């Protein structure tokens, strides 16, 4: 299956992506292709994987250097060959990262190259998990397409819930190929605040899962430890495991 994670900045998308990957790995649903589709790539850090090359860095070197293309290869074929250098391999999980594009704030071309590269790789993996950039740009660029399950993440705020509603509207407007959407409210201290609950009701949004605020996740991030190594007793791990069990049902 192809999973993707979307939501506003600071909602914990990368942490949720990591815990989804943790679940798939623990359940033996491997190999998993982890895709960091954020120009500010940090999924690798959450997974404890070192990223030396990104799609953006390969494209930059490919365009800046005078490349001697081996005989018998087209420029496109050689680029495909070079892109394989971005794959970070580990037991059960491989990672590719988009990284920064050419020029200030430009991610259009790297985004297209990433999408095409992922499409070519998917046949080699049991599951794919894509961690997207904040906001809705990736939707209009159609990065988040051909997805079986889109997890739309909100933090425990009214603004976060409203962003979720806008994302749902944009998916419908663009007629994206997303088979199912699941809303997740993340980092909830205790019970959801009544203002958040009222906004969810007003917008007609029913969360698939509530993920509690978990100091262990926070501590692992601070100590730069892989979230894949979180114990089963972690509250966030338990909530995401339950979510994935329902999704894969």
Image: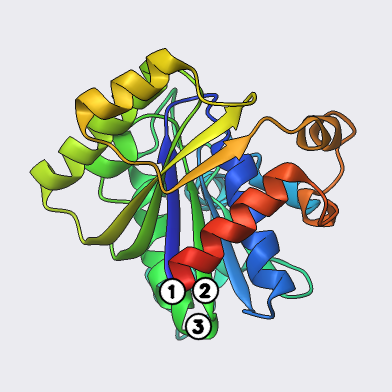
Tag 1 residue: 1
Task: Please tell me which residue lies in front, 41 or 213.
Answer: 213
The image shows residue 82, relative to residue 10, as above or below, that is below
Element at label 1: loop
Q: Is mark 2 on a helix, strand or loop?
A: strand
Q: x, y (%) of residue 107? A: 39, 37
Whether residues under marks 2 and 1 lie with C-beta atoms below 8 angstroms apart, the answer is: yes
Disc 2 crowd rating (10 Å Cα; few below 14, some 14-19, many 20+) is many
Numbered circle sitting on residue 71: 3
Residue at (49, 25) in percent of width and height: 9
Please say if 228 is above or below 154.
below
Lateral position of residue 99 relative to residue 138, left or right: right
How far is disc 2 from disc 1 in space, using C-alphas? 5 Å
> What is the basis of the colouring in this image?
rainbow
Q: In this view, does 125 lie to the left or right of 27?
A: left
In the picture of the structure, the residue carrying the numbered disc 2 is 127
Front position in the image: 179 or 213: 213
């Amino acid at each position: 299956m192809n999973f993707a994670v979307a939501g506003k900045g600071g909602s914990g998308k990368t942490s949720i992506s990591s815990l989804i990957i943790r679940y798939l790995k623990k359940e033996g649903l491997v190999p998993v292709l982890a895709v960091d589709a954020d120009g500010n790539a940090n999924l690798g850090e959450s997974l404890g994987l070192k990223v030396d090359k990104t799609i953006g860095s390969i494209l930059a070197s490919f365009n800046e250097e005078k490349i001697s293309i081996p005989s018998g290869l087209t420029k496109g074929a050689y680029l495909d060959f070079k892109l394989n250098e971005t794959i970070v391999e580990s037991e059960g999980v491989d990672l590719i990262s988009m990284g920064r594009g050419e020029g200030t704030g430009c991610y259009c071309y790297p985004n297209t190259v990433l999408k095409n590269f992922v499409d070519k790789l998917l046949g080699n993996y049991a599951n794919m998990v894509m961690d997207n950039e904040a906001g809705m740009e990736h939707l209009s660029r159609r990065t988040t397409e051909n997805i079986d399950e889109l997890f739309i993440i909100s933090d425990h705020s009214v603004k976060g819930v409203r962003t979720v509603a806008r994302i749902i509207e944009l998916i419908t407007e663009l007629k994206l190929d997303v088979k199912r959407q699941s809303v997740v409210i993340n980092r909830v201290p205790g019970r959801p605040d009544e203002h958040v609950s009222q906004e969810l009701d007003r917008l007609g949004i029913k969360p698939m899962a509530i993920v509690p605020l978990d100091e262990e996740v926070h501590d692992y991030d601070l100590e730069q430890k892989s979230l894949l190594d979180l114990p089963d007793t972690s509250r966030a791990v338990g909530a995401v495991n339950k979510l994935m069990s329902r999704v894969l049902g």
